[in-house]
Image (cartoon, grey):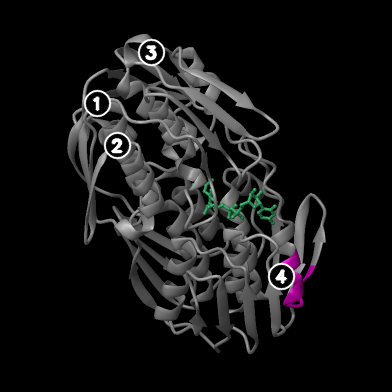
């Protein structure tokens, strides 16, 4: 187990080149199984979820080489189509291997991905959609799936699930079928998967919109691809500036992908400047409160930025309400912020946090525990804002999505050390 030791209470500032996107690269790594040859992915983040996914690819028979931010996967020959429980339980994204293995091998055995602290994480939409393609799926403690021949289908998603849309794309992109999907997730990570596959010779239209059409092709060709930057890591850095009344510029990011987040920070009184591939945020004085903020599927305010926003709002002028509408249990940060004397209560029925902003003089450094990846990152933001030294235990959660959080904090002038127990 490891902890982060953070001394805060002063403005931070700096320019940061943003790491590659966790949620974009994980489906691309799964998609590399569909290329009977070599796939090169650049700007791949060095995070534990990627390490785990690479282990899974190796266990399936791929050759995997890694040189800093470049990963080379040779999926010419696969030996297995079953993912081990040990690996699958380490991260939820192993579910994207279901679609990739069905697309490549026509069969797959995947342990049911466990729930996590933010919710039960069901896969019913994945299974519904794959069954529309003709997949036969048995659900025991593992998913046993067979897809003899991908059928053409029109699929309407009752909810725009990112992972379920990605799984259908992976299962059907190499086939003789034509798939129309409606009410699709519009997240940039869905668009990235479509761009990656089209670069490899696929025929997918509408990536990033609510209607996606996959026209199956015979095969995909080898490619080299540079994965886009992580919009949530960028948003987390901007939160550090908002929380400490500092000034941070994030580089290598498309500001359009974060417009819901930058609009909210601007409404809170931050000075936000957008550039072609950068965003800067400066906060002078306490931010304004938000009467009501709901997390929503893209292009709405991202659920993955909800905890970081709350960490900023604990010192806003006035009372804010943040409602989590995507996951059923994603307010784990609240009890931790209350240890810092933040004035927050939760309305469980509404899955809403009511935050009465306090001047940071009344907030205290504390011993904290990361409840999950994004709440862990949000505790870093809060610890940077308040006077004194805070400890954030279980910081291995943070390592799942942030390359080196301690280094990231120091790169903007913050103080952060790692304590490994
Ligand atoms: C992806 O998860 C991301 N993970 C999540 O980021 C992100 O929060 C989420 O999309 C929403 O943007 C990765 O890309 C690896 P969903 P995913 O399917 O695909 C329910 C992070 O911190 N649902 O869009 O699992 C589900 O329970 C992570 O980086 C079903 O009910 O998200 C949730 O309430 C957290 N049945 C909602 O839909 C299903 O079959 C959104 O889930 C699938 C999902």
- Is residue 216 visible from the viewing direction of this image? yes
User: What percent of the width, then of the height, locates residue 157?
Assistant: 68, 66
Q: Earlier in the sequence, mark 3 or mark 4?
A: 4
User: What percent of the width, then of the height, locates residue 114?
Assistant: 68, 44
Q: Which residue is mark 3?
A: 363
Camera-near label (2 vs 4) is 2
Q: Quadrant of residue 228?
A: bottom left
User: What percent of the width, then of the height, locates residue 258?
Assistant: 37, 53
**Answer yes or no: do the residues labelled 1 and 2 have beta carbons within 8 Å?**
yes
Q: Earlier in the sequence, mark 2 or mark 4?
A: 4
Observer-nearest residue: 330 or 264? 264
Q: Which residue is mark 2?
A: 269
Q: Earlier in the sequence, mark 3 or mark 1?
A: 1
Judge left or right: residue 300 versus residue 384: right
- Secondary structure at numbered mark 3: loop
Q: Mark 3 near ligand 1 (CB under 8 Å)?
A: no
Residue located at (29% from left, 13% from top): 387
**Answer yes or no: do the residues labelled 3 and 4 have beta carbons within 8 Å?**
no
């Amino acid at each position: 187990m490891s902890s982060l030791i953070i001394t805060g209470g002063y403005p931070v500032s700096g320019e940061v080149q943003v790491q590659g996107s966790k949620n974009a690269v994980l489906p691309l790594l799964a998609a590399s199984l569909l290329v009977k040859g070599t796939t090169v992915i650049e700007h791949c983040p060095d995070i534990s979820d990627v390490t785990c996914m690479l282990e899974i690819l190796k266990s399936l028979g791929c050759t995997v080489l890694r040189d800093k931010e470049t990963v080379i996967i040779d999926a010419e020959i696969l030996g297995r189509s079953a993912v081990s429980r040990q690996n699958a339980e380490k991260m939820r994204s192993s579910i994207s291997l279901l679609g990739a293995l069905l697309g490549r091998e026509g069969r797959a055995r995947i342990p049911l991905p466990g729930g996590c602290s933010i919710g039960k994480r069901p896969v019913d939409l994945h299974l519904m959609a794959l069954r529309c393609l003709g997949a036969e799926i048995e659900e025991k403690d593992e998913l046993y799936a067979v897809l003899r021949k991908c059928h053409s289908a029109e699929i309407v998603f009752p909810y725009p699930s990112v992972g379920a849309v990605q799984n259908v794309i992976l299962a059907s992109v190499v086939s003789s079928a034509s798939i129309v999907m409606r009410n699709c997730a519009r997240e940039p990570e869905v668009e990235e998967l479509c761009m990656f596959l089209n670069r490899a010779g696929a025929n997918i239209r509408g990536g990033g919109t609510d209607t996606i059409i996959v026209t199956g092709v015979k095969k995909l060709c080898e490619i080299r691809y540079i994965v886009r930057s992580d919009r949530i890591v960028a948003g987390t850095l901007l939160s550090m500036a908002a929380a400490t009344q500092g000034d941070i510029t994030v580089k290598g990011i498309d500001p359009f992908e974060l417009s819901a987040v930058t609009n909210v920070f601007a409404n809170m009184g931050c000075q936000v400047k957008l550039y072609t591939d950068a965003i800067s945020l400066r906060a002078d004085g306490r931010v304004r409160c938000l009467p009501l903020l709901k997390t929503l599927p893209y292009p709405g305010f991202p659920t993955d930025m909800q905890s970081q926003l709350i960490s900023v709002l604990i010192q806003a002028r006035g009372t804010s309400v943040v409602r989590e509408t995507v996951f059923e249990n994603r307010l784990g940060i609240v009890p931790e912020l209350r240890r810092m004397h933040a004035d927050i209560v939760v309305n469980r029925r509404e899955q809403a946090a009511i935050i009465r902003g306090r001047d940071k003089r009344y907030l205290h450094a504390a011993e904290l525990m990361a409840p999950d990846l994004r709440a862990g990152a949000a505790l870093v933001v809060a610890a940077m804002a308040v006077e004194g030294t805070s400890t954030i235990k279980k910081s291995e959660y943070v390592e799942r999505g942030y390359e080196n959080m301690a280094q990231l904090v120091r790169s903007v002038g913050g103080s952060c050390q790692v304590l490994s127990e």
